Amino acid sequence: MPMDSLRSVNSTQSDHVNSENKDAEEDVAIHRYASRPTSTWPKIRMEITGIRLTGHVWYRVVTGTLGMLCVLLLTVVIILSVERLHLNSTCSNCTSERDLLQTNLKTLQKENTKVKSRLSDLVRHLQDGWIFFASSLYYLSTERRSWDEARKDCIYRGPTLVIINNRDEQEFLTKIQNDYWIGLMEKDGVWKWVDGKALTDGFWDKGQPNNYVGEEDCAEIRSRSDFHNWNDDVCSKSQRWLCEKKRL
Ligand SMILES: [Ca+2]
Ligand SMILES: [Ca+2]
Ligand SMILES: [Ca+2]
């Protein structure tokens, strides 16, 4: 074999041996680096620059990256879950507020219906000739009847013969013309209103009650300028009467 050819063969064999040794060294290096903790991988990557990376190194890099992505996604899921819980809580509060508003609306609608009914009732009474003062409506009869018949008529109309509760009401009724039965009657020497309550503060005319013509056991309010204008009279006498109905 010529010398040149022999050198070429030796050179080829030497290159092959060197290549195999280099591969073996790389494998050893890769195995050493790959067995290190994941936290050291950036350093490993720097150290193995220029050295061929085998599959199991990339496997660790990829699995580590995926692990980090999983942690990141888990964090996002937790945040979104918390936000969803917050939204659900907010929505629940909204539902409660909506229910409360609907309840209040229904209450207001009921009150509105009541007010409309009262207003309609008031207008109807005024159109029928009733008069209004303070919180009461008053019916002034044009007929004349006995005290007991007058009482029955007031019961029929819904209210009672008028009960004078205070000075303001007395002052208002004093301005009305004509004489009227009021809801006050004497029994066993005691004057009582038609609601059963005893008289405590009367506005009797001077010298009244006096049983002037015998048994005067029913009271009337007389058309006089004097603030004290009550008189006891015979219950069978025909007289106008006043009915009272509490409205407000
Ligand atoms: Ca009254
Ligand atoms: Ca009497
Ligand atoms: Ca009298």
Image (tube, rainbow, N blue to C red):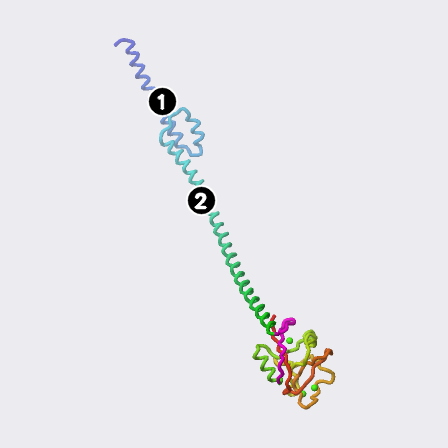
Instruction: Check whether the beta carbons of the residues at disc 1 and disc 2 lie within 8 A of each other.
Output: no
In the picture, which quadrant includes the N terminus? top left
Q: Position of residue 158 (x, y in %)?
A: 57, 77
* In the rendered image, the vertical position of residue 124 relative to residue 52, given as above or below: below
Task: Mark 1 or mark 2: name the one nearer the start of the chain.
Answer: 1
113 lies left or right of 55: right
Q: Position of residue 191 (x, y in %)?
A: 66, 84
Q: Position of residue 71 (x, y in %)?
A: 44, 40
For image coordinates 49% across by 52% down, the residue present is 91
Q: Which residue is mark 2?
A: 77
Quadrant hosting residue 3: top left
The secondary structure type at the circle numbered 2 is: helix
Residue stretch in magenta: 129-145
Quadrant hosting residue 14: top left
Q: Which residue is mark 1?
A: 22
The CB of the residue at mark 1 lies under 8 Å from ligand 1: no
Q: Which mark is residue 208?
A: none
